[in-house]
Amino acid sequence: MPKHAISGLHRLTRTHKLSVAGVAAAGAAALVFAAVPGADADQGQSQATNVENVKPVAFSAVGTAARAQAATITKQADNSAAEGKAEAAAAKKAAAEKAAKVKAAAAAKAKAERAAKAKAAASRSKVRTAIPAAAPKPAAKPVAKPAKKVYPDNLDGWIRESLDIMAKKGIPGSYEGIHRNIMRESSGNPMAINNWDINAINGTPSKGLLQVIQPTFNAYHVEGTSWNLYDPVANITAACNYAADRYGSMDNVNSAY
């Protein structure tokens, strides 16, 4: 029987197998009857006797052939069923092996990803460790205020302190010009007062080192100095401020001003 015919028996049940065997037996019987010569009308009794003697032998041969063919078909069907089961088992095994490979590949990929992440984290940690932390900036030292300059309490000290104040306020004048005019006006006495000149006659006598009247002192008073007209530094700076406005500088004054 051809291979494709046998493979078609995979789905035969036992009932199907017996039906096939019966058909095969009937076919064999037909072949035997076809082989036995027919009884013609003109044949004698001897031929009839021969037919009766042949009939049992023919049916016996038919039964044996049918059983042999049925057994062969049943065996082939069983073999086909066994082959089907084997193929199904092999397919199931192959599917299981494929699934196991896919699972193993996924596990290997996940493991590799975890290893890569761990390596990257370790690398970042190493870089952070390698870079030293910025050293803290030293605390800013407080800016020391310059010590207040101390001037001697005498004519020299008064003139020098006045010159420093004048320099900050932009008032011109020199040590020589101030000293020269002080010596002419008061001889260096901060409490000097003129009670005989025109100013005194008018009720506003000149006072202090540079003989300044009160209205002039008030008008040209320099901020940061005392408002006491007899104060040496206040008197000098106010007088120099007036002289700068009237004459350009105390240095230009050589007489009463």
Image (cartoon, helix red, strand yellow):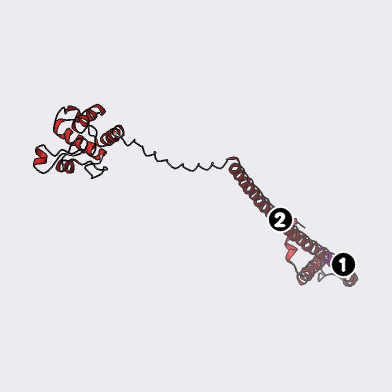
- Residue displayed at 62% across by 43% down: 126
Which part of the image, by quadrant, shows the C terminus?
top left
Q: Residues within 10 Å of mark 1 (few under 14, many from 20)?
A: few
Q: Image height check: is 135 above or below 98?
A: above
Nearest to viewer (mark 1 / mark 2)? 2
Identify the element where label 2 is drawn: helix
Residue 240 among magenta residues: no
- Residue displayed at 61% across by 47% down: 121
Question: Would you say the residues marked 1 and 2 are in contact, meaning their CB atoms lie under 8 Å apart?
Answer: no
Q: Is residue 132 left or right of residue 233?
A: right
The x and y percentages for residue 73 are 80, 64
Q: Is residue 106 left or right of residue 20?
A: left
Q: Residues within 10 Å of mark 2 (few under 14, many from 20)?
A: few
Earlier in the chain: of badge 1 and badge 2, it is: 1
Q: Which residues are magenta?
A: 58-72
Badge number at residue 257: none
- Residue displayed at 75% across by 56% down: 3
Identify the element where label 1 is drawn: helix
Q: Which residue is mark 1?
A: 64
The x and y percentages for residue 84 are 75, 61
Q: Amino acid at mark 1?
A: Thr
Q: Image height check: is 7 above or below 257?
A: below
Q: Image height check: is 40 above or below 156?
A: below
The x and y percentages for residue 111 are 67, 51
Nearest to the observer: residue 257 or residue 76: 257
Badge number at residue 100: 2
Nearest to the observer: residue 25 or residue 152: 152
Nearest to the observer: residue 92 or residue 40: 92
Which SS does the magenta portion mostly show? helix
Q: Amino acid at mark 2?
A: Ala
